[in-house]
Amino acid sequence: MSQFWSPVVQSLSPYVPGEQPKIEGLIKLNTNENPYPPSPHVVAAIQAELGSDGDRLKLYPDPTGLALRAAVAGHFAVSSDNVFVGNSSDEVLAHTFLALLKHERPLMFPDITYSFYPVYCALYGIESERVPLDAHFAIRIDDYIERNPGAVIFPNPNAPTGRLLPLADIDHLAGRLPDVPIIIDEAYIDFGGQSAVTLVARHANLLVTQTLSKSRSLAGLRTGFAVGQSALIEGLTRVKDSFNSYPLDRLALAGATAAMQDRVYFEQTCARVVASRDRLAATLGALGFEVLPSAANFLFVRHARHDAATLSAGLRERRILVRHFNAPRIDQFLRITVGTEQQCDALASAMEQLVGQ
């Protein structure tokens, strides 16, 4: 702590990201990275943008990200005016909190959800209220409608549970609360759900955010976007241009644009992850684990006879990392990223050893 810190900084409890250890041979299933590389077109686009001598790097990138916005718009059959791009979906969400979610009534989100939300609330001075998931860790839309929120945000599928909310429920929520901003954080939607982008034209209060870190294997490129009606996008742009007019560099713009345009590779990769997820879920279920229904690229599991922290430590001894959240209601769960078939087999073998002891 420093005497020069502002009161805001002194009060912050920053987000803690998943561990990124530098250990050779580690099977890393703790941060929901895609186990497969990005589209070959991504690498080619970055190399082309870089050129033979990197001369273009002396020039600022396009501050509007027009080519990437057009690629996102083409993917979803919307207008480029409905698309905002930023340096990861975390930055897009940060701008969203400041632009759209600070109101007289509290922002509401699930009690078990992405732990960056309360961090943003503390940073921007946003009053919030946590709405409990039900006994099966599902979101109940009526709970939000009845509480008269100032704004609503939640991931779909939710994280870290992986549970998917039907599109009809989101449609109902946005329709019942037409004067309330509704933010759907779709970091994992491509692994088992239908995007709420299809509802944007019908609801002026609905903003949908996504990332290229998961389904498009670009966690290292830090690119995300939001889709909503033009008035919401303008609000995000006003915040961006008051903070950093050039959030995405030339290489990120080139690579992300290529990733959005390669639909075939994207669909093939997602299908491989989903197949591995379903196979791993069945294997862990046979070992006695309770496995929550997942529409994401991870599983949320617990074992009735084995402590989660102990299992996590046992896996680490076997050079396998998973995520354990020491938090109310979920302290006996492990979140396991779906890896390659070989990585999933190694995890299953280690789990069989641990729960059999």
Image (cartoon, rainbow, N blue to C red):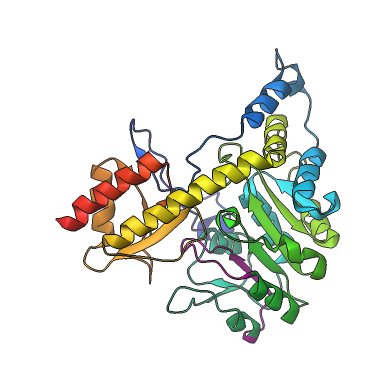
Please, is residue 263 above or below residue 95 in the view? above
* Between 34 and 122, the one nearer to me in the picture: 34
Residue 4 appearing in the image: yes
Residue lying at the far left in this picture: please name it: 357
Please, is residue 350 above or below residue 257 in the view? below
The answer to whether 17 appears left or right of 219 in the picture is left
The spot of residue 304 in percent (x, y) is 25, 69
* Between 328 and 349, the one nearer to me in the picture: 349
Magenta run includes residue 149 = yes
The spot of residue 248 in percent (x, y) is 71, 38
Please, is residue 116 above or below residue 319 in the view? below
The spot of residue 345 in percent (x, y) is 32, 45
The answer to whether 325 appears left or right of 127 in the picture is left
Q: Quadrant of residue 101?
A: bottom right
Q: Quadrant of residue 150?
A: bottom right
The residues colored magenta run 146-166
Residue 1 appearing in the image: no
The answer to whether 142 appears left or right of 349 in the picture is right
Q: Is the magenta region chiefly helix, strand or loop?
A: loop
Please, is residue 241 above or below residue 132 in the view? above
Q: Residue at x 22, y 63 (%)?
A: 306
Q: Residue at x 80, y 53 (%)?
A: 77
Q: Residue at x 75, y 48 (%)?
A: 75
The spot of residue 115 in percent (x, y) is 50, 60
Quadrant of the rendering where the C terminus is positioned: bottom left
Q: Quadrant of residue 223?
A: top right
Magenta run includes residue 11 = no
